[in-house]
Image: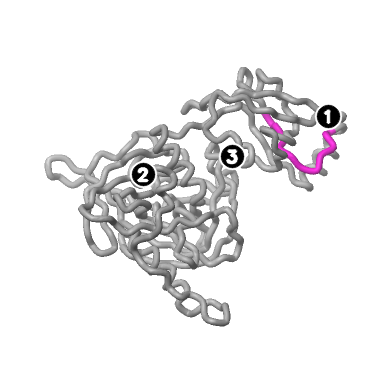
Amino acid sequence: MPILKVNASPLSRAHSIGTEPAALKEPSSSVDAFPSRRGDGCLSRYAIADAAAIAAPAVVNVKVSFGKRHAFFGETAGSGFIIQSNGTILTNAHVVANERRGLYKGALVVTLQDGRNFEGEVVSFDSLSDIAVIKVNSPRPLPTAKLGSSKDLRPGEWVVALGSPLHLQNTVTAGIISCVDRKSSEIGLEGVGTGYIQIDAAINQGNSGGPLVNLDGEVIGINTMKALAADGVSFAIPIDSAIKIVEQLKKHRHVVRPWLGMKMWELTEPRILQLKERRPGFPDVASGVLVTQVIPGSPAARAGVWNDDVIVEFDGMPVTTINQIVEALGDKVGMSFKVVVKRAHGVDATLYVIAEEATPDL
């Protein structure tokens, strides 16, 4: 079982070991909406149950069994959810693939809530984002999950997690959102470059790949991992980020990641004050993204980006977060991006950086 670190506390991936983008938004064919609010606008006692009932028919158990010549060696197990009625399923990459060795060699079986079993195949996966797309063939349309958005989530919102923890299929847990954008660097995941939804709903081995839904029954995240050293500290991939990965997998069969060759740090007001105290002449900025390191020979270095530059505009838009730069880059390899930076002692510079495609060793 993969073990990660979160400020000296280990994390565990929540699984056990032993079409076109527009089509992703097709309406659910599983369950009609439930009246989760009373006439006075307050949540009813059935709000969580209603949300679970809407999503549950599209939730699946994913199992890969290892064996040779009828000898059973072991298995991996996790969860997933159907995003298209033709049998397209979204799950975590670590449920079906080892980060170093690639896909697990074995029979992949997908089990629906109603007990039906299907033989599945992995269409594509991306280990860095921990997203995988698998496919089953059914003689008739399958129930699909309603996809929501993770853009406007707020701490304190109720959420419901569905999946098969510890091989216990059709399990529902609930909790609240603890943080809407927990940086990967904060939980010891260097190089991932994405944020996670932190929740206090119970997530255990086997929950990986299952949906995290709001009280409307819409998927807003993919349950992925938990902290081993603490209860109620679990993480999900935001559904908006997952959909972008799926779109790239459909388009390229892999994820295209533009590379500029610089390390960055988001500037908050306290950080700016500290830097101004320590570095005389530090740029007079209220926000921005600080370049902490430029890789020699990289696109950023060739464009003239320096260490300690503060990026205030990227591709014509003001920026205050690294994610804004990542969003602007998208999958635009080979394109030139206008970068406006502020330097020490009031010096400004406008640079043009041509993005290259990142290779696995970058």
Quadrant in which residue 66 is drawn: top left
Segment tinted magenta in the rendering: 282-293
Relative to the observer, which residue lies in front, 100 or 57? 57
Is residue 257 within the magenta segment? no
**Disc ID at residue 327:** 3
Q: Residues within 10 Å of mark 3 (few under 14, many from 20)?
A: few
Q: Nearer the viewer, mark 3 or mark 1?
A: 3
Q: CA distance from mark 3 to mark 1?
A: 27 Å
In this rendering, the answer to whether 96 lies above or below 166 is above
Q: CA distance from mark 1 to mark 2?
A: 47 Å
The x, y position of residue 181, in whole percent, is 59, 51
The x, y position of residue 164, in whole percent, is 34, 60
Badge 3 element: helix
Instruction: Report whether residue 165 is seen.
Output: no
Q: Residue at x 59, y 39 (%)?
A: 327
Quadrant in which residue 347 is drawn: top right
In this rendering, the answer to whether 66 lies above or below 214 is above
Residue type, label 3: Glu
Relative to the observer, which residue lies in front, 27 or 41? 27
Q: Residues within 10 Å of mark 1 (few under 14, many from 20)?
A: some
Mark 3 and mark 2 residues within 8 Å of each other at the beta carbon = no
Residue carrying label 1: 344
Q: Residues within 10 Å of mark 2 (few under 14, many from 20)?
A: many
Residue carrying label 2: 133
Relative side of 258 to 351, left or right: left
